[in-house]
Image (tube, helix red, strand yellow):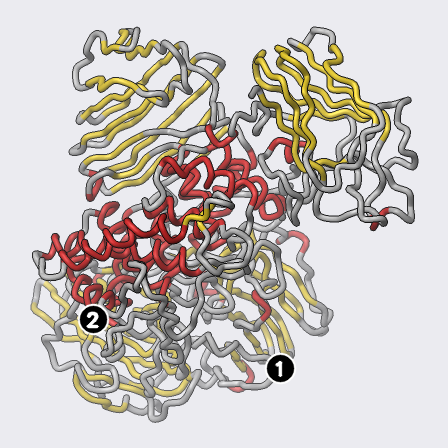
């Protein structure tokens, strides 16, 4: 499958140096770069105010208002500390002595429906002995959104005591400051506007209407004519109420950067679009420097301006006369910035600043499979772009903290980023519970000013995720604080006469995008998972009152789930009365919840090989279910089927839906299931006790011959490197201190594996042998030889005598996921030779199967069309099953492309001659049904289908008489 020509640094964070430039700066000032104010981190919720600081504002307040504040401060000596509490409605930028100290401070409101977040930053590095000048720019959103609740008033609060060797000097907000509405910014409502979900407005800056404002952040600027700030009340006053410490780090940001195609950017405007390419999909603030006449209008937006089918944010800059520069401070997301620059404007420079959540890409994944590597990397980039004030679903259309997305994001983040990312999960949990309705409903997205509808199953998933958060972080305080809210919410649910949960539609009865949604399956699986978390949190909090009730409901669902919902005729979970296609989501979630036991795995695996109803959101759980059933090869196959178009796409991120464009966004947080399962299950690193006190490394590489991962944990990084070569596995694991690890060395069903560590045989003949200090052998099963260690360090295991991966999901199909070669194969996003053995026995969009190229005659005997399956080693088999194409018919309603004259040939090894195991002539049309061919008992490594006469063409190619060999699947069996 073709990959993008360039995927540069998909998981690369930008420089940690935080080089900065003044957002609206002179050329001289731009060369002076600084470092940001250091955020003071604390888990304490309340931001105590110990001074006479007062909320202040400009004389008036209106939506999309930008206000400027200045004051001087004299210090008797250089400060030793200056810890400041700063709250703004809504965002602020702070300069001290002309140097940018805070870039985009403040968080969207709020921690609950009443209060306001407050930054804590250290200002001492920017202050000096003598006179100091502080300047703040505040952007008041002034409207509601799916990520922000409007207070109704612009305001700024600052509380600081500057400590110096010669005494303490207060620095507080109030009427000592000067404040006025910035003359350059306008609340322009002409043209396209951000959709109703976004509280941000477009940025409009008219430099021609703001003479003299170019250097307003500099100490030398004359502010004598500015009025004093308006007093808006003490700390705690409405509408901002209590101040809550910012629970996440200040955002990181780079210096101004050159675009990828910088050398090709024009030197002058022409009125057409200038497309400046970014190195990836990024959160950016675009910059320009031009020489222009007054009144030239420059438009700025990204290529994702209408991502998801609706407008997000753009910027307009109106020039003054002469050389000038401008940085649009409202961040945008995309892969290129598009400037529309009129004729008569000379372009001196175009650049951008990248910003985002303060965390590093500590986790990694690589394997011998380029497809899976790219998929993991795109998921990681998608994940990072959906982190800032909160987790959000997309960085364009909504920027909203939908909790269905958050559940997936937190799990992905544990394998991608350092522990600073955990603070965003902590904040999300506190916000979800802080916004709970008085009537008990939890809802999302929050914070929000124009949304309050419950999505009931997303809320159950959210409750379940609290225990996941606890297991990965060990943070008992956060989850026990959430328990009273969980308890209140779950009491809204009840069981029916069948002993299963009663469906609650909530405010929006939504379980997934798409069709064929078996709600009763999903409701019960989600509620069962939520009950499990409720029991865990009750025990942690010491509130045992409702445990018996939760346990009784859980037992009832466990007893009745199969009795009511298992459909013997279809071999799948199907609710009585449900008439749609079998729901892969519901069957998968039954496995994830533990409601489907091992006796159901084979049947459910078959469901997941042949039904594709889940959106990318619920595909997360389909893939997790396959690994829980130890079907890694089926998981790989399904990923290749589902994600072919997204991996082949030239973009850097994964999509909301399975097709690009239309109503879905190109960058959606919920679509990261492959990242999670490849690290958590493919490499096998998962906590088994809270905070990684104990953990397991049980890799499921499936058909991968090499896997390397690094997994960041609260105890350090765990790395795994595994190589599988013929009958040998070498595996190295770096363990972390203060924890006990269970390590499983994969044996792939080998009969008599021998494991050595450091040249010493520690397992052979089915028993533990010599001991290695710090390592204990715990025996084996069909999948692993198990070891335990509580010692940190690097352990290298070599295992001889392993087998080949025998994924049970193949169901006895020896060809499942085996390599396929062909002398005539059309390769695109719908058809491929590898799809002939991927386990999908029906044709569907995105996975139609195998097809040859077109032929103008059915007779291809002069140059037969062939496909050949490599079984990996010589194996005995007796049957070949051919599944026809099923997504269309011929003009007379027959099956298209099924072979008419053909031979099934076998050979033992690469150099051996092929022999005809079976010849077929004048095969009748299968009419959409599979055909099984008995070869007798043969032993071979390669099976070739060689066709000399092709079946009739599909109806859409009948006019051209295009004949092809077309099949959905080929199986090799030994019944």
The spot of residue 95 in percent (x, y) is: 33, 69
Residue, x 67% and y 44% (percent of image)? 843
The spot of residue 91 in percent (x, y) is: 36, 74
Look at the picture and state if 47 lies above or below 229.
above
Of marks 2 and 1, the one in the foreground: 2
Residue, x 52% and y 79% (percent of image)? 205
Q: Quadrant of the N terminus?
A: top right
The spot of residue 550 in percent (x, y) is: 19, 57
Look at the picture and state if 459 lies above or below 228.
above
Q: Is residue 7 visible from the viewing direction of this image?
A: yes
Q: Which is nearer the eye, 245 or 692?
A: 692
Counting residues from the start of the chain, the first of labels 2 and 1 encountered is 2
Neighbour tally class for label 1: few under 14, some 14-19, many 20 plus, Cα within 10 Å: some
Element under disc 2: strand
Q: Which is nearer the eye, 600 or 202?
A: 600
| Residue linked to disc 1 | 294
Element under disc 1: loop
CA gap, disc 2 and disc 1: 45 Å
Residue, x 39% and y 10% (percent of image)? 800
Does residue 111 appear to the left or right of 679 in the view shown? left
Does residue 350 appear to the left or right of 800 in the view shown? right
Look at the picture and state if 605 lies above or below 159.
above
| Residue linked to disc 2 | 244
The spot of residue 2 in percent (x, y) is: 66, 38
Q: Is residue 25 visible from the viewing direction of this image?
A: no
Q: Which is nearer the eye, 815 or 691?
A: 815
């Amino acid at each position: 499958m073709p990959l993008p020509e360039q995927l540069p640094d998909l998981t690369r964070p930008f420089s940690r140096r935080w080089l900065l430039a003044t957002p609206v700066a002179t050329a001289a000032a731009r060369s002076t770069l600084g470092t940001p104010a250091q955020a003071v981190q604390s888990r304490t919720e309340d931001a105590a105010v110990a001074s006479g600081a007062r909320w202040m504002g400009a004389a008036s307040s209106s939506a999309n208002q930008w206000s400027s504040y200045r004051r001087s401060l004299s210090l008797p000596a250089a400060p030793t500390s200056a810890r400041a509490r700063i709250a703004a409605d809504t965002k602020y930028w702070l300069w001290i002595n002309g140097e940018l100290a805070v870039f985009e401070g403040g968080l969207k409101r709020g921690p609950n429906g009443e209060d306001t977040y407050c930054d804590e930053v250290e200002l001492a590095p920017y202050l000096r002995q003598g006179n100091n000048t502080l300047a703040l720019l505040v952007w008041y959103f002034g409207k509601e959104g799916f990520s922000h609740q409007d207070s109704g008033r612009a305001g700024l609060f600052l509380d600081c005591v500057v400590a110096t060797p010669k005494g303490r000097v207060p620095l507080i907000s109030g009427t000592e400051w000067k404040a006025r509405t910035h003359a350059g910014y306008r609340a322009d409502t002409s043209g396209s506007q951000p959709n109703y979900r976004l509280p941000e407005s477009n940025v409009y800056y008219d430099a021609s209407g703001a003479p003299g404002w170019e250097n307003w952040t500099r100490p030398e600027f004359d502010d004598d004519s500015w009025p004093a700030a308006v007093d808006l009340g003490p700390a705690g006053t409405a509408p901002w109420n209590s101040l809550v410490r910012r629970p996440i780090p200040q955002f990181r940001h780079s210096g101004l950067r050159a675009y990828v195609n910088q050398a090709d950017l024009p030197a002058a405007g022409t009125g057409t679009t200038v497309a400046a390419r970014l190195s990836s999909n990024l959160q950016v603030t675009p910059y320009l420097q031009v020489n222009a006449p007054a009144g030239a209008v420059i438009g700025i937006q990204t290529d994702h301006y209408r991502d998801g089918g609706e407008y997000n944010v753009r910027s307009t800059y109106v020039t003054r006369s002469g050389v000038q520069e401008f940085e649009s401070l409202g961040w945008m997301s995309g892969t290129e910035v598009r400037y529309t620059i009129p004729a008569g404007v000379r372009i001196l420079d175009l650049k951008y600043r990248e910003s985002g959540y303060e965390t590093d890409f500590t986790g990694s994944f690589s394997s011998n499979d380029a497809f899976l590597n790219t998929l993991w990397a795109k998921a990681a980039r998608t994940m990072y772009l959906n982190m800032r004030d909160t987790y959000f679903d997309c960085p364009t259309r909504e920027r909203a903290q939908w909790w269905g997305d958050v559940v997936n994001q937190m799990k992905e983040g544990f394998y991608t980023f350092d522990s600073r990312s955990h603070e965003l999960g902590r904040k999300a949990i506190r916000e979800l519970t802080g916004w709970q309705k008085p009537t008990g409903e939890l809802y999302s997205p929050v914070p929000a000013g124009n949304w309050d509808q419950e999505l009931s199953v997303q809320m159950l998933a959210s409750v379940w995720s609290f225990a996941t958060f606890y297991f990965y972080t060990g943070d008992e305080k956060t989850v026990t604080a959430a328990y009273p809210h969980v308890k209140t919410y779950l009491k809204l649910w009840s069981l029916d006469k069948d002993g299963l949960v009663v469906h609650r539609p909530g405010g929006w009865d939504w379980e997934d995008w798409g069709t064929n949604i078996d709600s009763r399956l999903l409701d019960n699986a989600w509620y069962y998972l939520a009950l499990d978390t409720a029991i865990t949190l009750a025990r942690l909090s010491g509130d045992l009152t409702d445990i018996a009730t939760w346990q009784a409901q859980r037992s009832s669902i466990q007893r009745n789930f199969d009795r009511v919902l298992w459909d013997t005729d279809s071999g799948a979970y199907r609710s009585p009365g449900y008439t749609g296609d079998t729901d892969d989501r519901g069957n998968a979630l039954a496995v994830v919840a533990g409601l489907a036991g091992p006796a159901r795995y084979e049947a459910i695996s078959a469901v997941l090989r042949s039904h594709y109803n889940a959106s990318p959101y619920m595909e997360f759980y389909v893939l997790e279910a396959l690994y829980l059933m130890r079907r890694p090869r089926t998981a790989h196959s399904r990923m290749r089927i589902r994600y072919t178009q997204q991996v082949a796409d030239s973009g850097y991120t994964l999509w909301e839906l399975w097709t690009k464009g239309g109503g879905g966004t190109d960058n959606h947080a919920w679509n990261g299931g492959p990242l999670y399962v490849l690290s958590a299950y493919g490499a096998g690193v998962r906590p088994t006790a809270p905070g990684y006190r104990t953990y397991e490394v049980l890799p499921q590489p499936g058909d991968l011959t090499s896997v390397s991962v690094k997994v960041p944990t609260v105890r350090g990084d765990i790395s795994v490197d595994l190589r599988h070569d013929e009958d040998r596995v070498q595996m190295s694991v770096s363990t972390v201190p203060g924890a006990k690890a269970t390590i499983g060395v994969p044996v792939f069903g080998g009969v008599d594996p021998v494991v050595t560590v450091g040249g010493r045989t520690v397992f052979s003949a089915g028993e533990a042998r010599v001991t290695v200090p710090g390592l204990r052998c715990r025996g084996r099963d069909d999948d692993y030889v198990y070891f335990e260690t509580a010692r940190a360090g690097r352990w290298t295991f070599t295992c001889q005598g392993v087998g080949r991966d025998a994924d049970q999901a193949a169901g006895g199909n020896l060809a499942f996921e085996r390599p396929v070669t062909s002398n005539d194969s059309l390769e695109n996003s719908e058809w491929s030779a590898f799809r002939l053995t991927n386990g999908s026995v029906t044709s569907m969009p995105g996975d139609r199967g195998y097809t040859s190229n077109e032929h103008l005659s059915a007779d291809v005997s002069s140059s037969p069309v062939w496909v050949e399956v490599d079984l990996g080693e010589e194996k005995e088999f007796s049957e070949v099953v051919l599944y026809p194409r099923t997504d269309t018919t011929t003009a007379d309603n027959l099956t298209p492309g099924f072979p008419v004259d053909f031979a099934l040939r076998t050979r033992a090894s690469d150099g051996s001659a092929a022999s005809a195991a079976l010849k077929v002539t004048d095969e009748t049309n299968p009419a959409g049904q599979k055909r099984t061919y008995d070869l007798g008992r043969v032993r071979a490594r390669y099976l070739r289908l060689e066709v000399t006469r092709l079946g009739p063409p599909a109806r859409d190619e009948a006019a051209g008489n295009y004949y092809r060999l077309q099949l959905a699947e080929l199986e090799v069996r030994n019944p």
